[in-house]
């Protein structure tokens, strides 16, 4: 199983970026997908998480600016980031809570990380 993220880059304050992450492999069911981020010198933190058939949660710092969405058919999660601030600068990691068929197990999977830099 692999999570492949893309879409990071350099943007000015107030700008927008869209991150994408596709899960591939022997996936039986996606329980949840989302995004975490880690800024230099800080711990990894939750940005947004979408639980299949249930709730979506956002970090307070991004609520109203970021929107998470999913394409269930493609096992893909997106993060639309608007009105970006300098403090949004971080490496963003895609996350998946997946049930796989080979082996038949439920595990957390992480993408490779994509850097978002917001310049002032």
Image (tube, rainbow, N blue to C red):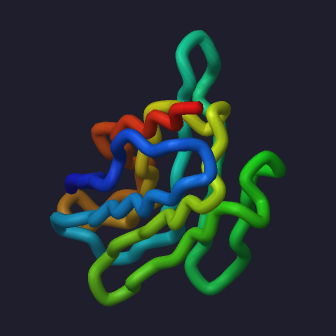
Q: Position of residue 4 (x, y in %)?
A: 24, 54
- Quarter of the rendering occupied by the N terminus: bottom left
Residue at 51%, 43% in the rendered image: 12
Q: Is residue 55 above or below residue 62?
A: below
Q: Along the line of sight, which residue is nearer the eye, 17 or 78?
A: 17
Q: Residue lying farthest right?
A: 60
Q: Is residue 20 left or right of residue 27?
A: right
Q: Position of residue 117 (x, y in %)?
A: 46, 34
Q: Position of residue 65 (x, y in %)?
A: 70, 62
Q: Quadrant of the rendered structure where residue 3 is?
A: bottom left
Q: Along the line of sight, which residue is nearer the eye, 101 or 8?
A: 8
Q: Along the line of sight, which residue is nearer the eye, 86 or 93?
A: 86
Q: Quadrant of the rendered structure where residue 111 is?
A: top left
Q: Residue lying farthest top?
A: 41
Q: Is residue 93 left or right of residue 42?
A: left
Q: Is residue 95 left or right of residue 51?
A: left
Residue at 43%, 39% in the rendered image: 116
Image label count: 0
- Quarter of the rendering occupied by the C terminus: top right
Q: Quadrant of the rendered structure where residue 15 is?
A: bottom right
Residue at 20%, 65% in the rendered image: 24
Residue at 59%, 29% in the rendered image: 44
Q: Position of residue 115 (x, y in %)?
A: 38, 35
């Amino acid at each position: 199983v692999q999570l492949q993220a893309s879409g990071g880059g350099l943007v000015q304050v107030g700008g927008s970026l869209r991150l994408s992450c596709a899960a591939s492999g022997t996936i039986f069911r996606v329980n949840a997908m989302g995004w975490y981020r880690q800024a230099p010198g800080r711990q990894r933190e939750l940005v947004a998480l979408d639980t299949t058939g249930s709730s979506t949660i956002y970090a307070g710092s991004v609520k109203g600016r970021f929107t998470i969405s999913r394409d269930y058919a493609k096992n893909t999660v997106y993060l639309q980031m608007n009105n970006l601030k300098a403090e949004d600068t971080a490496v963003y990691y895609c996350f998946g809570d997946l049930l796989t068929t080979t082996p038949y197990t439920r595990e957390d999977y992480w993408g490779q990380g994509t850097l978002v830099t917001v310049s002032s």
